[in-house]
Image (spheres, grey):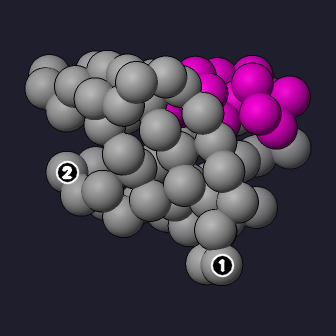
Amino acid sequence: MLINVKAVTSARKNDIKSAPDGLKVYVTAPAVDNKANRAIIQLVSEYFNAKKSQVTIKRGIKSPHKTIEIIT
């Protein structure tokens, strides 16, 4: 399953909200040294009740607009 994600880094709290074109993911981690991407993977895996190893960022490693794949 592919999901479009808009990432918001350095947020006040970790949260996921539905958006018209996918999900909006808020993480407290800064966009430095891949910390935000790791936090996004952790949060999305919890949201979809999947293992972290099943969640990968396919596109947008350095962009706030990401395509995430969840392998079930």
In the picture of the structure, the residue carrying the numbered disc 2 is 62
Between 19 and 38, the one lying in front of the other is 19
What is the crowding at mark 2: few (fewer than 14 residues within 10 Å), some, or many (at least 20)? few
Mark earlier in primary sequence (2, 1): 1
Q: On the picture, is 67 further left or further right than 17? A: left
* Residue drawn at 53 percent across, 25 percent down: 14
Q: Is residue 21 above or below residue 54?
A: below
39, above or below 56, in the image: above
Q: Is residue 61 magenta?
A: no
Q: For mark 1, give the secondary structure.
A: loop
Estimate the spatial distance between the alpha carbons at disc 2 and disc 1, rounded to whole Å.
22 Å
- Locate residue 56, reporting x and y percent: 53, 42
Residue 66: image tag: none
Horizontal side of 19 relative to 29 (left or right) equals: right
Q: Which quadrant of the figure contains the C terminus?
A: top right
Which numbered disc, 2 or 1, marks the residue closer to the eye? 1
Residue that sits furthest to the bottom in the current view: 20
Q: Residues within 10 Å of mark 1 (few under 14, many from 20)?
A: few
Q: Amino acid at mark 1?
A: Pro
Whether residue 3 can be seen here:
no
Quadrant for the N terminus in the image: bottom right
Q: Could you tell me which residue is drawn at 49 percent across and 22 percent down?
A: 13
Residue 41: x percent and y percent? 53, 31
Residue 71 visible? The answer is yes
Mark 2: amino acid = Lys
Residue range corresponding to the magenta coloring: 40-52
Q: Residue furthest left?
A: 32
| Residue drawn at point x = 24 percent, y = 58 percent | 63
Q: Quadrant of residue 6?
A: bottom left
- Tell me the residue that label 1 is attached to: 20
Q: Main secondary structure of the magenta part?
A: helix
